[in-house]
């Protein structure tokens, strides 16, 4: 499968936000992550790195977590 784990980097630490991410889209300047079971999380963040080999999506905060 092609799912990835999404992480947020804060104060130099990488914290996991969501497992099994299959969808990322932009809505009104925010990122919306969706996982394999249909859960969604909206973030005021930017993509820092995507590693297809390690199945990781690394995000950096813009202003803060909006809703989960």
Image (cartoon, rainbow, N blue to C red):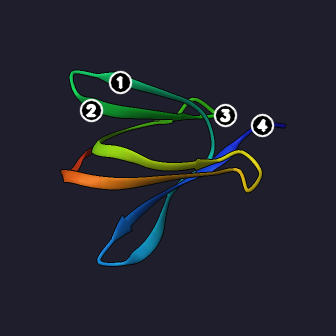
Characterize the local packing of mark 2: few (<14), some (14-19) or many (20 or more) Cα atoms within 10 angstroms. Answer: some
User: What residue is pinned by disc 3?
Assistant: 36
Residue 42: give its label.
none
Residue 26: give its label.
1
Determine the CA span between mark 1 and mark 4: 20 Å
Provide the secondary structure element on which disc 1 rests. Answer: strand
Q: Is residue 56 left or right of residue 58?
A: right
Characterize the local packing of mark 1: few (<14), some (14-19) or many (20 or more) Cα atoms within 10 angstroms. Answer: few
Quadrant housing the C terminus = top left
Residue at left offset 35%, top offset 34%: 31
User: What residue is pinned by disc 4?
Assistant: 2
Residue at left offset 46%, top offset 69%: 15
User: What residue is pinned by disc 2?
Assistant: 30
Determine the CA span between mark 4 and mark 3: 10 Å
Q: Position of residue 45 (x, y in %)?
A: 29, 46
Chain-order first, disc 3 or disc 1: 1
Determine the CA span between mark 2 and mark 3: 20 Å
Q: Is residue 20 above or below residue 64?
A: above
Residues at circles 2 and 1 in contact by the CB criterion of under 8 Å: yes
């Amino acid at each position: 499968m092609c799912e990835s784990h999404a992480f947020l980097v804060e104060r130099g630490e990488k914290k996991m936000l969501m497992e099994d991410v299959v969808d990322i889209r932009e809505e009104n300047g925010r990122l919306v992550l969706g996982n394999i079971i249909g859960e969604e999380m909206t973030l005021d963040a930017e993509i820092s790195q995507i590693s297809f080999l390690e199945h990781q999506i690394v995000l950096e905060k813009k202003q803060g977590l909006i809703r989960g």
